[in-house]
Image (cartoon, rainbow, N blue to C red):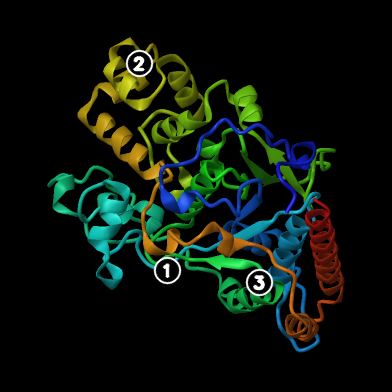
Amino acid sequence: MAQGCCDCWRLGLCPALSVSASADPGAQDETVQGGRLVLVDAMSFIYRAHHGYGSTRLMSDAGVDTTIIYTFVSAVLALLELQPPPTHIACVFDAPGKTFSSEDGQEPERARAMNLGPGWSRNEIYPGYKGQRTPRPPEIGENEIYPGYKGQRPPRPLEIGESLPYIRQMLRLMGVHEVTVNGVEADDVIGTLATRAIHAGMLVAIASPDKDFFQLLQPGLQMLRPAKRNVMAPLSTVAGNLVPYTADAFIAEYGIQPHQWADVLALSGDASDNIPGVNGIGAKGALNLVKQFDDVESILEHASQVKRKQSREALLSERGQAEARLAKRLVTIQTEMDLPPLRKPLQDLALLPPSPEQVRALQEGFAELDFRYPTERMMAVWERMKADLVAETHEVMSI
C-alpha cells in the first residue's frame, strides 16, 4: 500500500500525524501504518436514504423496494472510489437492544472497558435515552431527574427492516467489512476503532451526518458529511455528495476545540438521542458558555458568574447540575473500549482484491436487484485494486 497520503488524501487530512504509537499491543500493527481507514456510520446513512426519497421509491423487476439498498450501496461505492482509495473500510451498525447491557453475561467486562463501574448503561442511567423504556436504577434516586423524557421513539420503518438483510448481503459481496458489537452503540465502536487506527499511524475518515462525531476530530482524523440538501454541492465534495470536515474547519466554525463539543451537547441537549441537556440553555447559549468557561465542570463551578438569569439559575440548581453531568456522560463517545470484538487486528478491515468466485457472486447478487450501474462501478474499483497491487509488487521487487 502507498505510505502516507497524497494531497492530504484529498480529504483535508493532515499528513503529519501528531500522535505517537499506543502502548496497547493491539494498536501497534506495522501492517496498517500509513493506511487509510474509512468508518461508515451505517444506520445514519440508511435512515437518511429512507427519508430522502419519501413516497418516490425504486423497485426491482421482482418487486423488491431497492430505494434504501441502492442509495446505501451507492454511498459506499463513492467511498471506495476516493482517490487515493481507502486501504481499509468498515460499515459499523448499532446492535439491537440496550447499550452496554448484561447480554451474554458480559456486563462487568463492558463496565470495566469503559471505567464506569459495574452495571453502567446509557439506558440505565437515563431511561429516556433514545426513547427506550427501561427501568430506572436506584442510583438515580427516588425523584426522577427527567420526568417526561421516556417517550418511545417511532418504531423502525418497515422499509428499513426489509432492506437490512439485502444491505448486509451487498456489503459481503463487495468485500466491505461489517462491524457490530452486541450491546455497544455504533458511535462507541467507531470512536474506539478510529482512536486505535490513529495510534497505529493510519489516516481516518468517519463517514456520517451525525454531529456527535465532531468531538473526535483531530490531526489525521476527519469526517465526511453529506452536503446540505437543496444547496449546490461545494467544490470540496469528494465522495458522492460527501464533504470533508476537519478539526481546523470545526475550530473556524465554532471557535472551540473539537473535544469541547461534548460539553456543548451536554448543556444544549441532543434531540436525536432524546437527551434533554440543561433546561433553558439552547445551542447558542451552550456554545457561549463553553467558550467562556471551557467545560461543564468549570461552568458549574462558576455558575454564579453566568450573566443570563435563566441559565444561571438552572446551573446553580441541583436539578440543573444533575442534568448537565448526566448529559455529559451520555453524549461523550467512548474511545478506549476493551472488548474482544474491538481487539481484533485492524488489518482484518483491509480491502482485498476479489477472487473469481466473489466477482461472479457479486454480479449475480447485483443482477437480482437490477443493479447494473453499481456493478460496473464495483468492477472498476476491483480493477483499480488489482492494478495497484501489481504496481506495488513491481515497486517492492525493484528495491
- The residue singled out by tag 3 in the image is 171
Alpha-carbon span between mark 2 and mark 3: 53 Å
Report the residue at 16% width, 44% height from top: 143
**SS for callout 2:** helix
Task: Name the residue at 81% across, 86% down.
Answer: 61
Give the x, y percent position of residue 169.
Answer: 64, 78
Contact? badges 3 and 1 (CB < 8 Å)? no
Quadrant in the rendering for residue 55: bottom right
Asked if disc 2 and disc 3 are in contact, CB closer than 8 Å, the reply is: no
Distance between the alpha carbons at the discs numbered 1 and 2: 42 Å
Q: Is residue 42 visible?
A: no
Name the front one of labels 1 and 2: 1
Residue 326 lies, with reference to residue 136, above or below; the image says above
Q: Which residue is mark 1?
A: 96
Q: Is residue 98 above or below residue 137?
A: below
For badge 1, the amino acid type reads Pro
* Numbered disc 1: secondary structure: loop
Q: Residue at x 73, y 81 (%)?
A: 358
What residue type is disc 2 on? Answer: Lys
Q: Which residue is mark 2?
A: 309
Mark in the foreground, 3 or 1: 3
At label 3, the amino acid type is Leu
Q: Is residue 24 left or right of residue 120?
A: right
Question: Which numbered disc flags the more N-terminal residue, 3 or 1?
Answer: 1
